Amino acid sequence: MAFSIRTWVTTAIVSALLVSVTIFFLGVLWLLPENFSWRSRVILAKIEGNLPEIPVPALANWLLPASQVKLRHLAKDPDVRAGIRNPNLGEAVARIGSLVYSRSCAQCHGSNARGQSAPNLLKFVQSKSDWDFLSLVKWGRPSTAMRAQPISDLQAWQVHSFLTKLGKDGDSIRVPPVDLSGTAILNARETTDQWLTYGGNYAGHRHSYLRQINRQTVAKLSLAWAAQAGSSGSTISSTPLVVGHMMFLSESPAGVTAFHAKTGEQLWHFERPLAKNIALCCGDANRGVAVLGDKVYIATLDAYLLALDASTGKKVWEVKVADYSANYSITGAPLVLKDSVLIGVSGGNLGAMGFIAAFAPEDGNLIWRFDTIAKPGEPGHETWPGDSWEIGGVSPWTTGSYDSELDLVYWGTGNPTPLFDKRERAGDNLYSNSVVALDAATGKLRWYFQFTPGDDHDWDAVEHPVLVDVTDQSVKQRLLLTANRNGFFYVLDRQSGKFILGKPFVKQNWTSGLSPEGRPITRPSASPSQTGSLVWPSLSGATNWWPPSFDPVRGFFFVPALESASVFYRDSGIFTGIEPNYESGNAHDPLDGKVTAAVKAIDSITGEVRWEAILAEGGSEVVPKRISGLLSTAGGLVFAGYRDEFFAFDSDSGKRLQQIRLSGVIRAAPISYAIDGVQYVTVSAGDTVFTFSLVPDKLDTESVRSPQGITSEAG
């Protein structure tokens, strides 16, 4: 009862104060020479709760005759976005606004307002109301770096006028239509100014021959522009492509944004609604797009492949790759050849049967399909006892490489299911944990190499294959390099699949070595058990899908590496195939587990680790087991991201030369390109794309490229 009386008294006092304030304002306004009727209607609208966006102090100030924020239109319709407009547009006002902007805004949003450490303001002004801009300036945006700005209402409108004019002037920016030929992609190494495929070239080198940014100049790296992705909020995992002056970036869950690669201005954005209730085992990442001709190709989480018009972003065609209701999804970037678009599927950890498929670039018609599980009547089916092949998994969920001379596609495959129990699938389980070489025209299997037969540690072999040519005594060797999740670095003959070399590049205890054919000599004690087995590498692997890079001059293979262990458990029962998941066990970090995250340089001929650059080390509870992909350059640099920091290392020694903290977690691999004699390096952090170049006084536009013809490569 006491509580009710106290509540009633409080309510009465607040109501009385509100009535008193209202009467006061009405009295004051009655005495003003201007017509007070519209002001009284605005006040009544506020009392009735129709103007929640305007705080009472601001309302009182803006009702005064000298206010720069005009509220008269709110008397008829209390909609702030329609009724509150900038009253100060004009050339003279815009000139003053440019000075205010330079002093108060340019440091974060860039001198051209197209984004720097903060997003593109031109796009904000073009897409939002005048009220949205004013309220952003006056009160900031909660939970972001945008705080209330110490400028007057008049100055806010002056800045708005400047941005409005600047945006109209910038509307004239145009880029030539995209028309990327298959020949241009084949010669990607010669087109060093662009980044045309997921791996930089068909060989997957992720190496740029640009050298304006080098060991001597990287300390002067400066932010050229930053732009927020169209699907803001999700962490970007994709590799952007740069074709001409256009940058194409895929975003989760199903978006593509095209930016002007020089300014960061958004040219178009495509967003596709996704089906509901999609089964995802391992996150909603999308790792990139492909470009061929005048089209951009993207695969979706609900297992569709789409072609978009590269100049406008409009959908050209859409085809169903697999049935998402059967636990299929797609997270990898497509690989385009001159007459086909290739994609691998995800979902193996949920029992979906893996395959790689090729589609016609013009209309999406299916050309061929290769199943990564050997079916009845096919070679290798005997490695799946009973009906275990039916829920075998083996998803090829990343992107492959291509040798145009041999006309072979190389693709890594995932683990079999159930993950941690191989008793019901005793055998090698072909073609799990392998690299497969497929005829590009037909999809027929030419050869395979299996890294981890009968895997029960979830060590996918989906790491991006790197193709390298080495000439020894006038004999050309066509090699395939890969650092595997199982802890070994491998060198294979990519024409025959013959094993050449295998060496551990991190600590491992699951095998006593490799046979002369490259088959692991496994230790039974390393298999998951009911009591738990401590095994190096960990469940995350010695590396993962994070793309490596290869420097053809130094012969160094650079890889993101993890030194860590997991305790692997197997369930006591027998897997029946009807469980809601397909693990039949689990794995976790040991209580005293230690993790080292690093970038390692491996000699591609000997397999020896030449240097190691530590990114972080410590307890597993504080050191994330996730590293970005890598980029190497002719400037003697290796770029990498970890947590929210962007690093540049010396290619020869691993010495840290640059370290930049960004505003989000880095999961994507960096790229490099050049426009008008200026080299850029781009990396995504969180939901923002950051592009760096050198400060103008450090530019050497005559030497942006390195000499060509140093070594040959496939594609």
Image (cartoon, rainbow, N blue to C red):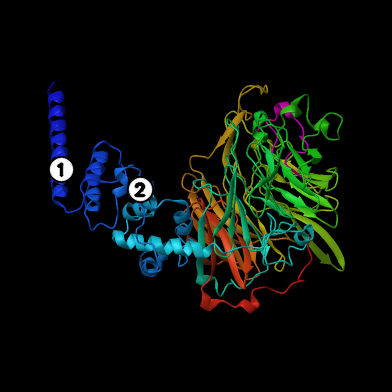
Please state if 59 lies on the left or on the right of 272 as rendered.
Answer: left
Q: Is residue 432 magenta?
A: yes
Q: Position of residue 705 (x, y in %)?
A: 67, 73
Q: Residue 480 versus residue 169: which sits nearer the camera?
A: 169
Label for residue 501?
Answer: none
Q: Is residue 38 magenta?
A: no
Q: Residue 434 versus residue 314: which sits nearer the camera?
A: 314
Query: In the rendered view of the protein, which quadrant contains the N terminus?
Result: top left
Quarter occupied by residue 364: top right
Is residue 459 depicted above or below 423 in this figure?
Answer: below
- Residue appearing at x 87%, y 30% in the figure: 377
Q: Residue 646 versus residue 197: which sits nearer the camera?
A: 197
Q: Which type of secondary structure does the marked residue at label 1 adopt?
A: helix
Identified by mark 1, the residue type is Val
- Specify whether residue 649 is in view: yes
Eye-nearest disc, 1 or 2: 2
Quarter occupied by residue 38: top left
Q: Position of residue 317 (x, y in %)?
A: 71, 43
Provide the residue designation for mark 1.
21
Magenta region, main secondary structure: loop
Separation of residues labelled 1 and 2 (CA atoms) = 24 Å
Q: Which residues are magenta?
A: 415-435
Provide the residue designation for mark 2.
83
